[in-house]
Amino acid sequence: MKKTMLGGLSARQFIEEYWQKKPLLVRNAFPGFGEILSPNELAGLACEEDVQSRLVLQQRGKWKLEQGPFVEERFAQLPEKDWTLLVQGVNHHLPEADELLHEFDFIPRARLDDLMVSFAPDGGGVGPHFDSYDVFLLQGVGQRMWRISGQDDMTLVPDSPLRILKNFRIDQEWVLNPGDMLYLPPRLAHWGIAVGDCTTYSIGFRAPSTQELATQFLVFMQDRLHLEGLYADPDLEAQSRPAELSGQMVNKVETMLQGIHWSGDDVADFLGSYLTEPKPHVVFERPRRIGMDKFREHLTKKGLRLDLKSQMLFRGNRIFINGETVQVEGELLALLCELADKRMLPPGASVPDEAVALLHQWVSAGYLHF
Ligand code: SIN
Ligand code: CO
């Protein structure tokens, strides 16, 4: 963590006072921060199949949204002002972006979503809105004016392709310069407007809804449920209406379903697999097959790195990587937890024999690289 990035606050102080509670503006949070990628490189990413990108334009007072991937010519036809290009998951493509995310390691990785980068010429932005996640907005090149509002009125403009607040009331306003950073908690209304050409880096932390967690948990639990028995009604009550679903049957089935239970371990396994599951557009490139001897040699000489798209977490003796779970012990467990934390294993690290086969498998799947 950079000393300056929370304006002199420790991670603990920041979390106690601001995290999920109130906004924090930090001037010169990243002194000398300029750009990780140029607007041209950003546009290049937005043309790729496996990258999620959006263009937002304001035309005659109306908001327009176009989804990527784009063709290069699209960028040549854009107006001088009042548009913005937003690219998600830039950390999946640039090691420097992944490094930037490491500065935010004081917040658990399980909460991290991705790094989004936007470029806008003068006047560009996505309008007044609120997000349901925490975000650190780090100013790259140029300036952006941020307006925020503590308002409760979350009424949206009807029939708009974007979620725009109908009545935005400005409470505070700042112009951010390169290296300045604004933290915003979820549901705080905000509006960023480019002042000249401007690049903004959004480090976003996901907050899944209860509904989403519950739905996904039930899907996960389907394969784990093993309930004994069969519906039985030796005490069947004769009924005069044959088509009527009886209260007796409803009660019996309700009792049967009360046999559905889960434990903290089920929840942990679900979370590990759900949070590391790659998004649908993510593809891992498999390298050419490499024999075990060569693999050992490379491992010792070069160490290993997680692929930029890989997500890895752990809890207890369980390791979660890209939606998969393995249970390990002892030295191997310590090594894999280290890999998950640092996203790399240094050259010459002592690797127990049983780890070699597992790491080889993950390298073959494209999850790890030398
Ligand atoms: C941006 O325009 O870069 C930030 C979008 C946002 O306000 O969430
Ligand atoms: Co926002």
Image (tube, grey):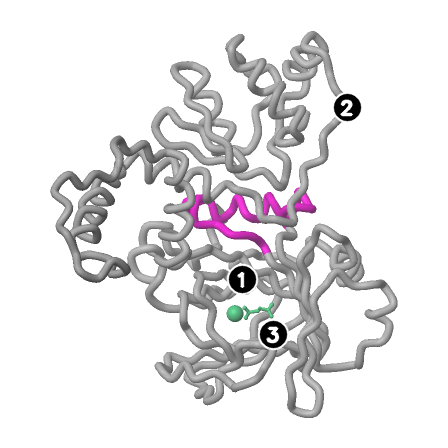
What residue is pinned by disc 3? Answer: 144
Q: Quadrant of residue 244?
A: bottom left
Q: Amino acid at mark 1?
A: Asn
What residue is pinned by disc 1? Answer: 28
What residue is pinned by disc 2? Answer: 288
Q: Amino acid at mark 2?
A: Arg
Tell me the residue at 15%/39% (across/down). Answer: 234
- For the residues labelled 1 and 2, the Cα–Cα distance comes to 45 Å
**Is the C-beta separation of discs 1 and 3 under 8 Å?**
no
* Magenta-colored span: 91-115
Tag 3 or tag 1, which sits nearer the N-term?
1
Which type of secondary structure does the marked residue at label 3 adopt? strand
Q: Is mark 3 within 8 Å of ligand 1?
A: yes
Q: Quadrant of the C terminus?
A: top right
- For the residues labelled 1 and 3, the Cα–Cα distance comes to 14 Å
Towards the viewer: 196 or 73: 73
